[in-house]
Every structure is written in structure tokens, then in C-alpha cells.
Image (tube, rainbow, N blue to C red):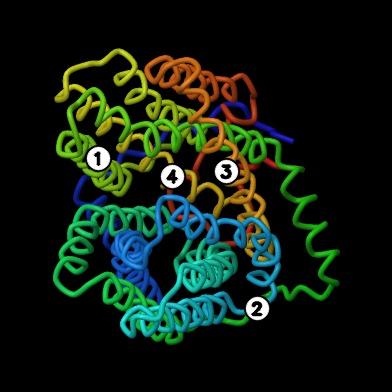
Amino acid sequence: MLLHDRNPAGPVPRISWAARVREAGAPLSIRSYRLHFTARLLSWTGSAVAPIGLAFAVLRIGGGPGALGAVLAASVVPQILLLLVGGVVADRLSRSRVMVWSNVVCAVAEVAAVLLLVSGTARVWHLVAMSAVCGAAGAFFTPAAGGIVVEVVPAELRHAANALLKIGQNMVKVAGPALGGVLVAVAGPGWALGWDALTFATSALLFSRISLKAKAVKVRTGFTADLREGWDDFRSRRWLWVMVCQAAVIVPVWLVGYQLLGPVYGQQVLGGAAPWGLVVSGFTAGLVAGAALALMWKPRQVGVVVCAGTGSMAVPLAAMATAVPLPVLVVATGVAGTGLAVSMTVWASLVQERIPADRLGRTLSYSTLGQILPVPFGYLLAGPASHLFGLRTTLATGALIITAASVVPLAIAQVRGLYLAPGATKDTGGPVPTARAER
């Protein structure tokens, strides 16, 4: 249980900007982290291009919106079914090895799809199968990738390491879709998927060169016991499951409001895809700015910062509900992107600080599963709700739900009392002495 509701470490020491800059780039001096960072950056460039290639590939072989929906759903269902298995595997085996084979599997599946597309023999079910294979591989990759920073970066540099990864990921989101559009237009959708396959293969090679020391604790129990231990560890941390419940509400509402109803709003109110593209650019710029801010700023009050950051995602939905001018909506989405990037970065640092390394994979798998489970239901309910209540009323309701969900956890002392360690800490693989929180 939480032993402190106030900052247990006392006043935060002043740190010069020069020292902050040095600390921000320090993780890149670590070879294993450089390999991990480069591999993830390559993989993200592929992931930014692949959705465009996949969508146009489906359309080119005669599929419609329903076929594209089936292809996209095929990548989500295996993740839901296999995430918990992936968490156990990540804690049992070398995380870098799990990441290597996950990338290899995706590369092989996409190469097969590319050959079918180029030869003109591809069918929708081929792309559904490819999407399902990659989704299954992702269920193993996600827990492993979430825990590897703990193994390659000292505790005092993990916040900067997480922020650098987030900056790289968000910067790729700026240029990736444009690259995908050009690649599809010039070479065809098959070659866009081919680029994604190439990035998977190259990333696998880089992941294979990451040197990890042997784990101090090996999981020796049976698979079911591992799952039960991970669940017991997850539910015993009240602050963790409360915030996952918050995400389980906010994530589907945001995806419905921004990704699904947002383009509809752009078409009906803003006048088409071009103005909505400006809104999307504002959000992406906010993601980059937020990650850069998190790189230079390590907030202590994590619970408050995360709730504020997730609460900012209500701003664009409220802006659309009130039909604000386009420039105001662009700024609103930029605010949401900034808040989201900051909250995700500091949350990742907190989880890595508080969860023992030998249980991190399973904890992350339960956390991720809790967030994505409601998403399909949100997509299914969004259409009927917008038809029944109207687009702007549905968006306004979403804004209210996100606002309420962001505030409610702050009524719990454990959430208000979440703090990051102020400086260098001994890497014990579990909670640091200055931030005792769980049990």
C-alpha cells in the first residue's frame, strides 16, 4: 500500500540546462540502446508507410471498406488473444531474441504478401492472413520491447531514453504517411509493403546485436502459474490498475472521436480532406513537441501529470463539438498531442521504475490488454451513436467522458502520490527507496 501521499524525497534539486542537455543525449552513448533506438526508428518508418500500402492493396484487388475492415481487424484479434502469452515469454526468454523473431515473422509474412501482389494473384484472404500473422507477432514484441530499456539503460537515464524513443516515433509520423503515399503512387502498394518488410528484417538484424546480461531471476514455474503471478502482481498495485482502467475508458473514446468521427467532421464541417489534414498535422506536431518537452523536463508528480496529459485529449473533441474555426482546432489537437506524449513518456518511466524487471513483461501485457479490449466495441458503437444523437453531440459526450475519466483517479491517494525518483538511483530492478509505493 502507499506509504506516502506527499513527495517522499523532499525539495527537488535545481539542475542547469546544460546538465539537462547532457543527460538528454546520454542514453545514445550506450551501444545496446543505440541499436535498439535505430532498430525501432527503422521499424516505425515501415509502420508509417504500411497502412497506406495495405489500404490501396485491398482496393486494387477488388476489396471494399468491409474487406479493409477485415484486414485491419485481423491484426487486432491475435494481439488480444496472445498478449498475455507474450508477456510470459518476454519474462522467460531473452527480450532481444523475442524481438528478433517477432520481426522475422512479420518480414516473412509481408514478403509473401508482396510476391502475391506483384504477381497479380493476391486475394483479400491472403492479406487477412498476413495481417493476422503480424498481429500475433506483435503480441510477443510489445511486452519484450517495453521491458528492454530496463535491461540496457541505467535507472537514472531511463526517462531520457523513453523520451528519445518517443521523439523518434513521433517524428516518423510526420513524414511517414507522405512517404507511403509517394511510394504507392510511384511503385504501387505492394512495394510499400515491401519497404515495411525490409525495415522488419533490418530491425531484426540490429536487435540480434544487442548484448543483454543474463537475467538474475529466471522464471521456473509453469505457464499458468506465471500468468497468475503476473495477474496478482498487476492487481496488487492499486495505482496501476486504476490508471489502466482510466486508459480503458479514454483510449477507445479518443480513437472513436479523433480517428473515426474526426474525418467525418472534416468532410461535413471543414469541407474535405485537406483541412482535416491540417488538423492531423497539428496533432503530430504536438506529439513531437511533447516528446521534446519530456526529454528536457522530468516531472516528479507523475499521477497529476499523466491525468492532465490524458485529460488534454478532450480538448479537440470539445473544439469539434462547438465548431470552432479551423486554426483553433489545429491548436487544440496540438495541445492534445503534447499532453499525450508527455504523459506516455513519464508513465513509461514510472512503470519501469516501480515494476520488478522479471515481471515487467507480464505487467505490460495485462496493461496493454486492458487498454485495447474496449476498442472494438467503441468502433461498433460509434456509428449508431452518431446517427442517433448527431455528430457534434457524440463528440461533446466523448469530451465529457475523457474529462471525467482524467479527473476521477486523482481522488485516490495512491495516484496523487506517484513520484519519479529525482536523480540517479541504484538499479535494483524494483521500486526505488525514495518512491516506496506498492506493498
Callout 2 touching callout 1 (CB < 8 Å): no
Give the label, 3 or 1, closer to the camera. 3
Q: Which residue is mark 3?
A: 376
The residue lying toward the viewer, choosing from 268 and 424, is 268
Nearest the camera: 418 or 370? Answer: 370
Q: Earlier in the sequence, mark 4 or mark 1?
A: 1
Rendered view: 94 above or below 404: below
Report the Cα–Cα distance between label 3 and label 2: 31 Å
Calculate the distance from the C-alpha at mark 3 to the C-alpha at mark 4: 22 Å
User: Can residue 9 be seen?
Assistant: no
Q: Amino acid at mark 2?
A: Leu
Q: Amino acid at mark 4?
A: Met
Q: Give the number of the mark in front: 2 or 1.
A: 1
Residue at which label 4 appears: 344
Identify the residue at horizontal 58%, vertical 68% (top origin): 136
In the image, residue 321 above or below residue 99: above
Secondary structure of residue under mark 1: helix
Percent from the top left, x then y, of residue 310?
44, 32
The residue type indicated by label 3 comes to Pro
